[in-house]
Amino acid sequence: MIFYFTGTGNSLAAAKAAAQPGEQLVSIAAARQKGEFRYTVPAKEPVGFVFPEYFATVPIAVIEFIRRLELRHGGYVYAVITSGGGRHHGDGLLRRELAARGITLSRVFGVHMPDNAVLYFKAPDARKTETLLRRARLKCGEIRRAVRHRECKPVRGGLFASVMQPVYRKMNTTRPFLAEDTCTGCGKCARNCPDHAIRMANGKPFWQKTHCTLCNACINRCPVQAIQYGKDTKNRGRYVHPDLR
Ligand SMILES: Cc1cc2nc3c(=O)[nH]c(=O)nc-3n(C[C@H](O)[C@H](O)[C@H](O)COP(=O)(O)O)c2cc1C
Ligand code: SF4
Ligand code: SF4
């Protein structure tokens, strides 16, 4: 069983590519919405957690899911962290959060993928995107084989990701989000938001929560690029994994 969290599709694609044949994928966003936190996984099956790196730490949605998770299993538990910079820092924090639920993490893998953080950086161009996605597919194949062989490696990582949590939780305001007049009122942003932070009102999106996981799905996945985050996101382009386009 793989628990995945994604904003723009990279981590979903990584989860699918790293999955064993027939392995079940569980969306953390959907599970939180339905209040489904109890799972039983047969001892011979691996359990994976696949999610993106945010601010050198673990997404709030993933931490909040794990804190309520009741997982009965007897087997191998691993994680895959996708990142735009190719480095991941959430290992130690994830290990501690899982240990608090009685779950031992055996291995963490990293996958370098296109950077979706258009709130801060320009989206990668088509060529860079294609190269990164090709390499990521190969890496996920290696991960699938390593998981099949239950490869373990001590999960290191100190306190850096824990130190970054308060920084992240200061940055995750929704206040700068706005929809321009080109918005067609399709409601996709509200439907795609894993935090239910967006509500449609009079045919336009309204950010009803003051803070969110900041997954960048709304801004990247708007079909007409009507969403901005303050003044700087206009010319940054947008990124969505091809499977979600
Ligand atoms: C708010 C935010 C913060 C991010 N911070 C980092 C970071 O600290 N380091 C990094 O390498 N990538 C960072 N990224 C990039 C994502 O980790 C990367 O693009 C990831 O593959 C996106 O996964 P998804 O498509 O499943 O949402 C950040 C993305 C967002 C939206
Ligand atoms: S996805 Fe874009 S066009 Fe659709 S409602 Fe949201 S802002 Fe408007
Ligand atoms: S409001 Fe936008 S950035 Fe925040 S969680 Fe929802 S989709 Fe992600």
Image (tube, rainbow, N blue to C red):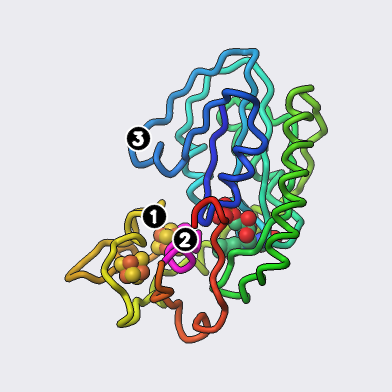
User: Image point 82% across, 32% down: which residue?
Assistant: 153
Compare marks 1 and 3 and give the one earlier in the sequence: 3
Query: Label for residue 35?
Result: 3
Q: Secondary structure at mark 2?
A: helix
Which amino acid, by three-letter code, is at mark 2?
Ala
Q: Between residues 16 and 153, which one lies in front from this camera angle?
A: 16
Classify mark 1 as within 8 Å of ligand 3 or not, answering yes or no: yes
Q: Which residues are magenta?
A: 212-222
Q: Position of residue 83 (x, y in %)?
A: 68, 56
User: Image point 75% across, 59% down: which residue?
Assistant: 131
Which amino acid, by three-letter code, is at mark 3?
Gly
Name the quarter showing ligand 2.
bottom left
Q: Position of residue 119 (x, y in %)?
A: 54, 73
Compare marks 1 and 2 and give the one earlier in the sequence: 1
Badge 2: residue crowd in 10 Å (few <14, some 14–19, many ≥20): many
Q: Secondary structure at mark 3?
A: loop
Classify mark 2 as within 8 Å of ligand 3 or not, answering yes or no: yes
Compare marks 3 and 2 and give the one earlier in the sequence: 3
Classify mark 3 as within 8 Å of ligand 3 or not, answering yes or no: no
User: Image point 69% across, 31% down: which residue?
Assistant: 105
Q: CA distance from mark 1 to mark 2?
A: 7 Å
Please give the residue where the numbered disc 2 appears in the rendered image.
Answer: 217
Q: Secondary structure at mark 1?
A: helix
Which amino acid, by three-letter code, is at mark 1?
Asn
Q: Between residues 88 and 44, which one lies in front from this camera angle?
A: 44
Instruction: Please tell me in which quadrant of the rendered image residue 85 appears.
Output: bottom right
Badge 3: residue crowd in 10 Å (few <14, some 14–19, many ≥20): few
Please give the residue where the numbered disc 1 appears in the rendered image.
Answer: 192
Q: Between residues 46 and 20, which one lies in front from this camera angle?
A: 20
Do callouts 1 and 2 mark residues in contact (Cβ within 8 Å)?
A: yes
Instruction: Please tell me in which quadrant of the rendered image residue 15 appears.
Output: top right
> Can see residue 55?
no
